[in-house]
Amino acid sequence: MQEDIQHKHIVFFDGECGVCNFWVQWILEKDKNDEFLFASLQSDFGQKFLTERGLETKQFNTLYLWKPQQYYLIKSKAVLKISDILGGFYKIVSVLGKIFPTFFSNAIYDMVSKNRMKLSSQKCFLPDAHQKKKFIEV
């Protein structure tokens, strides 16, 4: 698994959030080129990622996208990069999203994040056998 991690983009998400789980499922469905792996922020792997970077380890309201040994992005920058990587129509969304200054797009991200528990039911996402291989830890 460690070798695979070096060549993937890892999405860290709140494993207890219905909105987050919805978007993880959405990315899984759109990831035709097998670019992404996933880990919840609450997992040992997620906690290690946060701790090594001096990031908050008890609040899980931020999405992180990590390309090992290259970069990690947060909030709206992570969302736009995911769109860019998915390509096609989503790449256009990414380009259009970059028109807005980061402080503005992050303000929208923060507003959604603050209200995310009200926006979605807390359904558990059950990945199929192929999708399970894309999760490092939940």
Image (cartoon, rainbow, N blue to C red):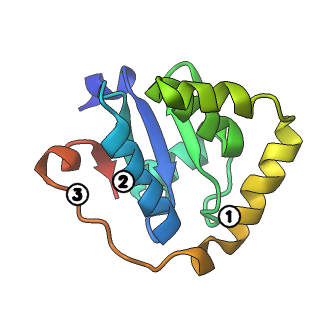
Element type where label 2 sits in the image: helix
Type of amino acid at the residue the image marks with label 3: Pro
Q: Is residue 9 left or right of residue 129?
A: right
The crowd level at tag 3 (other Cα within 10 Å; few <14, some 14-19, many 20+) is few
Residue 127 marker: 3
Q: Name the residue under label 2.
A: 25
Which residue is at the front of the view, 5 or 91? 91
Q: Is 43 situated above or below 106? A: below
- Point 36% across, 27% down: residue: 35
Element type where label 1 sits in the image: helix
Query: Which x, y percent locates residue 78?
Result: 62, 38
- Point 87% across, 35% down: residue: 101
Type of amino acid at the residue the image marks with label 1: Ser
The quadrant holding residue 125 is bottom left
Which residue is at the front of the view, 34 or 38? 34
Type of amino acid at the residue the image marks with label 2: Gln
Q: Is 23 situated above or below 83? A: below
Q: Mark 1 points at which residue?
A: 113
- Point 22% across, 57% down: residue: 127
Marks 3/1 in contact by CB < 8 Å: the verdict is no
Q: How far apart are marks 1 and 2 (CA)?
A: 17 Å
Query: Which x, y percent locates residue 31?
Result: 34, 34
